[in-house]
Amino acid sequence: MTPGLADNLETALETDDGAPTSIGLAIVDEPVLLPPTLGQPAPSLPTRPATYSASDNTAGSAPSSTGTRPIENHYIHNTVSSSSSRRNSGNYLDSKKGKPAILEGDEKGISRTDSRYSRLNRSLLLCAIAVALSSINYGWVIGSVNIPALVIEECSDGPETWTNGFPSCIPMGSIMWGLVVGLTPLGAWAGSMFSGVAADRFGRKRILIFNNAFFVAGALLSSTSTSIVQLGTGRFVSGIGCGVASNLVSTYNSEAATVRSRGFLGGFQQLMILVGLFLSQVVSIGLSAAPLWRVLFSISAGLAIFQSLVLFFVPESPKFLAKKGRMEESQAALQRLRTGMDISLEFEDLVAVLDTRAANAATPPPTLWQVLSGKTEVDLRHLVFCVLFLMMSQQWSGAKGVMFYSTEILSSTFHLTTSEKQHIPSIAQLLTLGIGAIGAVAVIIGMNILDKAGRRTVLIASSLSTSICAALIVVGSKLDVGPLVATAMYLFNLVFQSGAGFIPYLSASELLPYNVLGSISGLAASVNCLTLFIVSFTFPILDKALGPYLFTPFIATNFITFLFGVFLMPEAKGKPVSQVVAEYQGPIHLVSVVSPRCLKKPPPLPVV
């Protein structure tokens, strides 16, 4: 299922006698399961005016032909239409391969495919990359303090000296360094608070361009720092840019994605963050010495300026333009994202969804308190709790602590002397470089298995494995076995980033209806950033206090996430939001792989 298809979906099937039968989607009083025998036409069901909006953010995949086999786990509303009307609409699937058929041709004789069922194309990928340069910058800001940390805070490269008015280092204690590092997620929290409202008013692309001013200002403040206050302020300002980017990159990509590219683009943001982090660490090897760490910080400004120029060639979100009534611009933007494809039906679906929302606009969306207290027409408390928990668990896992402080941890683990720390690259810096690389590889692995195994299964396996790896880090630290600690940290990042690291970014759009998505997403982003601030600030304090037992708290937190996955996590694989809401509505409760509500009867479609 895909955004805009909820009111206009047809699956072309072949009957035993070769005559195609159309199974379409209409809004009805109750959904029905597709009968076991698809060779017989399904009876038409009465329709009624829409009382809910088809969500922009349903999960699933494009319909495919299955011969005469029953289709399971999909609630489909049945109508019958002729094969000729289906071909004329362009909504026709190859019955043997389950792929979209080529339309007969437009007025110029150019064959095109129905854009609703297209895969990731070059135009969409290039636009997604251009937008995700903000995510790369986010990763750069996070990772750039890791390798040169000892040079900046402990003056490991030599005594503090001043050159042209700038000190070679800014000595400070571990608590103050934790605060400086933690100011970035605190700034991200501030950025996430206003980014959604600003983007809804001015557009996703325009706010991303303006947001680069925060990256530029933060980079200039950090790279010219002469005091702890200035360095901390620069990190906070850069953090604002990170928070805005975190919200808008995912928003733009989800609104621009085709149904078959949603899974890939859903994890694209986390992948690009890790790419930025890895690149910052690669460059840090050559720029961590004094005073070159200042050049390292300034590169963020260059990335921001470059992206601002590139974004002028990227179309605005078609959904944003259509929502503002700029229909011609919206259609042109959608066509640029679907080069060489027929977008007529996809654009009609988009307009139909917006018209439905406009018809329901007389009913104001519920307040945040109404949603949290369950005083809405459909009780969303369980789903809201799951979204907030996942966003918090992503940060309390300890993974960001590894990204921020792995160089210091490994330097201590391998008992590096002062002279060894001054030797660049040291073994700790090289190992940190590998940790960043393996994180990017892990996200790619996770993106490929997520739609096959399901969100819940991947989260359970990932969080349990992360907890075990945290225990191995503790064992290696206690036994003073450096290679074991390093190996466990590599495995820790691998298993975390392949599941628990990016599933939280998908949770809000897959579990929540559209009318509460904005308010809950903002709250979830705040929870995520504040948890990261707490972890970033306390991590060096815990390091001094716990010593070899540093990762003991993260054994517990990741195991709690594992228990959450087993007993509370909804499964959204292949389901529209309306079905997820129907199955998991109510107060916080235990769930099973197949919801008991789903076993009793087909779930009613809630007002979303």
Image: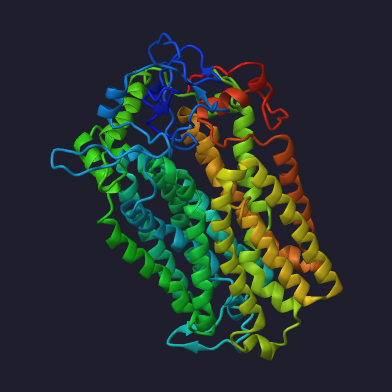
Along the line of sight, the residue nearer the viewer: 60 or 524: 60
How was the colour assigned to the protein in this rendering?
rainbow
Image coords of residue 51 (percent x, y):
42, 16
Farthest-out residue, right: 479
Along the line of sight, the residue nearer the viewer: 465 or 607: 465
Image coords of residue 608 (percent x, y):
48, 23
- Judge whether residue 239 can be spotted in this image: yes
Image coords of residue 248 (percent x, y):
41, 48
Residue at position x 40%, y 60% from top? 133
**Which image quarter: residue 532?**
bottom right
Q: Does residue 329 appear to the left or right of 125 in the view shown? A: left
Q: Does residue 228 appear to the left or right of 301 in the view shown? A: right
In the rendered view, tell whether residue 429 sits above or below residue 571.
Answer: below
Q: Does residue 201 appear to the left or right of 559 in the view shown? A: left
Farthest-out residue, top: 46
Residue at position x 39%, y 25% from top? 18
Image coords of residue 75 (percent x, y):
52, 23
Farthest-out residue, front: 17
Along the line of sight, the residue nearer the viewer: 278 or 422: 278
Residue at position x 44%, y 15% from top? 41
- Judge whether residue 504 can be spotted in this image: no
In the rendered view, tell whether residue 594 sits above or below residue 603.
Answer: below
Q: What count of labels does the image hold?
A: 0
Residue at position x 55%, y 44% from top? 451
